[in-house]
Amino acid sequence: MPGAIEAVNDLMAMGLEVRFCSSPLRQYDHCVLEKYQWIEAHFGRAATERLILTRDKTLVQGDLLIDDRPRITGATRPQWQHILYDTPYNRQETGRPRLTWQNWRNVLAGALYRADA
């Protein structure tokens, strides 16, 4: 996505703990390796240690989760606030902050402000 790499680099430069949380495909013969390779190619080998692969993102701890999936369910109630990454297939969803790599600063500033309140 245009702007994504720059935004992630900016977030890390701000001192935020950024993790890459992804759900591998059920038929994952090459998927897991390709996710590691993509992270390494765009952020460097050290960033692969920030990659979390899980079929259940509700088990991951954090403050915010940026994800294009409108509904994330799993074994537990997540501790993070879901920020919906805006895509054509989830535009019918309402009630949640919507992020693009063009508006991310404003959306995350609002989300972090609400988290502190």
Image: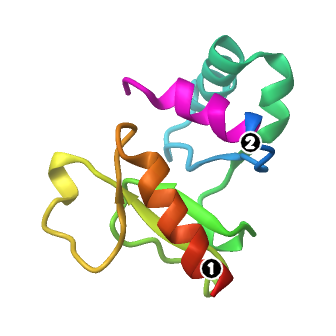
- Badge 2 marks a residue whose secondary structure is loop
Range of magenta residues: 1-12
Tally of numbered discs: 2
Asked if the magenta segment contains residue 103, the reply would be no
Along the line of sight, which residue is nearer the eye, 26 or 104? 104
Asked if the magenta segment contains residue 2, the reply would be yes
Residue 11, quarter of the rendered image = top right
Along the line of sight, which residue is nearer the eye, 1 or 76? 1
Q: Residues within 10 Å of mark 1 (few under 14, many from 20)?
A: few
Q: Is residue 40 left or right of residue 103?
A: right
Q: Residue furthest top?
A: 41
- Badge 1 marks a residue whose secondary structure is helix
Coordinates of residue 24 in the picture (x, y in percent): 56, 44
Q: Residue at x 58, y 29 (%)?
A: 29
Label for residue 115?
A: 1
Q: Is residue 14 above or below residue 1?
A: below
Label for residue 14?
A: 2
